[in-house]
Image (spheres, rainbow, N blue to C red):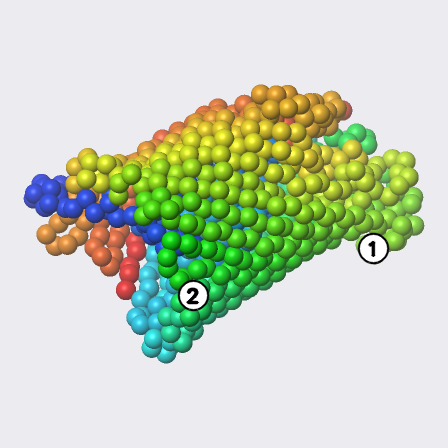
Amino acid sequence: MKRRSLTSLALMSATALGGLLPCIAHAAEAAEAAAAASAADDIIVTGTRRSVSVQDAPINITAVGAEQLEAQSITDIRNLANFTPGVTVLDTGARSASKIVLRGLSANDTGIGGSNTENSVATYLGEVPMYLDFKLIDIDRVEVLLGPQGTLYGSGTLAGAIRYMPKRPNVNDVEGYAHLRASTVAHSDDIGYIGDAAFNVPIVQDHIALRSVFGYYFEPGFIDYNYVLKQPGISLPQPGGLDLGTPAQQAENFERHKDADFERTFTTRNTLLVQTSEDLKAFLTYAYQLSKTDGYQSNSAGVLGTGKYERASRYLEPSRREAHLVSLEINANLFDFAQLVTSTALTRQKVTGNTDNTDLLLDLDYDYELFPGFSSYAPSENKYKQFNQEVRFVSAHGGPLSWVIGGFYNNFRTSQWRNEYVPGYTAWAGIDYRPDDLEYISFVNSKTKEKAVFGEATFEITPKWQVTGGIRYFKYEAEVTGGTDLPLTGGGRRRTPYPAIQFDPSRVRSGDTSDSGTVWKINTSYKFTDDLMVYATYSTGYRIGGVNRHPPCVLPLEPGQNVCALPDELIYGPDKTKNKEIGVRFSLFDRRLVGSVAGYHIDWDGIQVGSQTVNGALGITVNGAKAVSKGVELSFTGRPVSALEISGTYSYNDVHLTDVAPGVIVTTHHGRFDGEPGDRLPGTPKNAGTIGATYTVPFDSGADLKLNWTAVYRGNVVTRIGARGFGEKLPSYTLHRASITYGMDDWEVSLFANNIFDNYAVTSVGQSTEQIGVNDGVALRYYSHAVVRPRTVGIETRFRF
């Protein structure tokens, strides 16, 4: 069915082009008459807290407008990163959050379970700090501000900020759209589909309106879980010894689950606007999103003979993410002297999942492998609750002096638990007091509070020359409480009698930390002409410290297995940046070439980097040494002829250690490795770029035909600092995408293909090559490769009203 679907779409494309070719010839003269407006039309941005053209913004800001978001089917940050210089997002699939890295400021191993909670990048939904990975639908534009932005935004930034600006309710008109998409994915048996729609309804003319958007996504998976145990504790994980056995043995012991890394997501955002006039507006928003999948978008790197799109996990590894956001934003004109903007937000997120835990226990060398049917799984739950309050006053009195002052409060709470089970092990080992096979339990609760005041002032020395200065004072405190126990040990049996799962007070510990500081910024720009501006910025940034969300160790340690954090592993301090950059914005050849170029140099001190606990190899954050990030960013849009638009981005980023980082690289069996000066930091390519071309043919009927081709290049990356300690270098890759769109103002239909040549590329790895091997005849399986989505071909249509 998949092959027929692909063929049908290809035939549809050919038929459409064949029918339109005569019309193209007829419309050639009209194409010459088309204006170059799309190249010259600048997106209006508010990232500077003033409404200005992106070409007039005196800082390094990139904007992607609604037209490009729709044309390139950009629905999440993973796709957006391909069209914004300086932004890296490792595509690790629906089971992981999208980890955003700006200008290479991340020192953590690449991983397959990315996180968006590192707080080096502030993300906003409109004026509301957002800590959730919502789909990008019904978005007016996305603004990416590179470099520390703490003096403008309450959410402290180490590397920059990303603002998703949603379309606002309209109090005068009924309007909206509907969008449908169907697609096939190579190496998958399923048909994917997306449906989303927005509706804007005035309730009281000129005063009250509601805008609602809904979307449902089914993205087919392509990773097969072919070796899931039929009866854990009874079925043999390796029925053939050092291989997976004969077909008959596999049929007896395994279940096959094709395309397990699918994504099913429902999302909605609803905003009620109430305004007395243009001088007083209130926006009440409720957003909700639910995402589900059954597995990782990663393979098992060939272990036991598995293929490129196979994962050898013994269990399915489902994940469920549910998020709620409620916010109230008020905009008020204070007698034309200042604009008051206040945003209050409450976010909740619950993430539940299950992982194959077998290899972790095998790697800890507790002789579990002596049980032929040994396997382990680990269900977990993580809850996040966040309350934000931000207040800003923005000057509106006119004159050469303008200013912004504000305050910020953030209260972030987490609670999480994790249990580990070893099916069949207790019966085999003769342990009769825990028939549920519960081997390990843990819980962690944490709380972080941050307060800050910030401000910025701009003085226009002349109409062409301005100088800006800003400052921010911050203070935070964090605490953690957690516990662990081992119900199968003698002490654990006494503390956790079956069937209870509880924690004796003797197994619970706490820790806390706090800090404060100041960051600042100075910026200047000069407009030589309306088409040429130069700017320069010096700014400092920070990321708050915190507590590692793992159970503190109970000292003295009991003999045997311990999985916990020692006192010096519980807390970590803030890291800070000093950013210097200079940039040029230009419009040349009667605005047929519009773009910007910037160079930067960032000193990074006290790097927060991923490490592991001594006991149990739990992932933690520690402060490392010093690093530097320096590079160049370029973006442009050109129109050599009126019907042809060529756009592109390019980033060069050299980010590496400048000092020795003692013991920062942790391995399971080979101790710790030092990071050395010159070592590259992981995850970010030195070179990355995108080039695209769109040819537009207008017709006398008012319709347009648009032909687009885009190529995305990502250079090689290292998976671990300096590729030391069993790290490696992943090769570069190039992906191509194309689309054909025919439509008018109120409707369009498109044929598209992503990853046209079905390139296979590895974006990151899980664990390291140290985890490749055999433990007493049992092959370890938890080293893995996250891979890009294969070729996707489809059709979509959009209606506007």
Residue at 13% over, 43% down: 31
Q: Nearer the viewer, residue 746 or 585?
A: 585
Q: Nearer the viewer, residue 188 or 666?
A: 666
Horizontal relation, residue 577 to residue 32: left or right: right
Label at residue 337: 2
Label at residue 502: 1
Residue at 61% over, 50% down: 473
Residue 717 position, x and y percent, is 51, 27
Residue at 11% over, 45% down: 33
Tag 1: amino acid: Gln
Q: Nearer the viewer, residue 487 or 75?
A: 75
Horizontal relation, residue 306 to residue 637: left or right: right
* Residue 221 showing in the rendered view: no
Tag 2: amino acid: Phe
Residue at 24% over, 45% down: 40
* Residue 647 showing in the rendered view: yes
Mark nearer the N terminus (1 vs 2) = 2
Residue lying farthest to the bottom in this orientation:
204
Q: Nearer the viewer, residue 289 or 580?
A: 580
Q: Secondary structure at mark 2?
A: loop
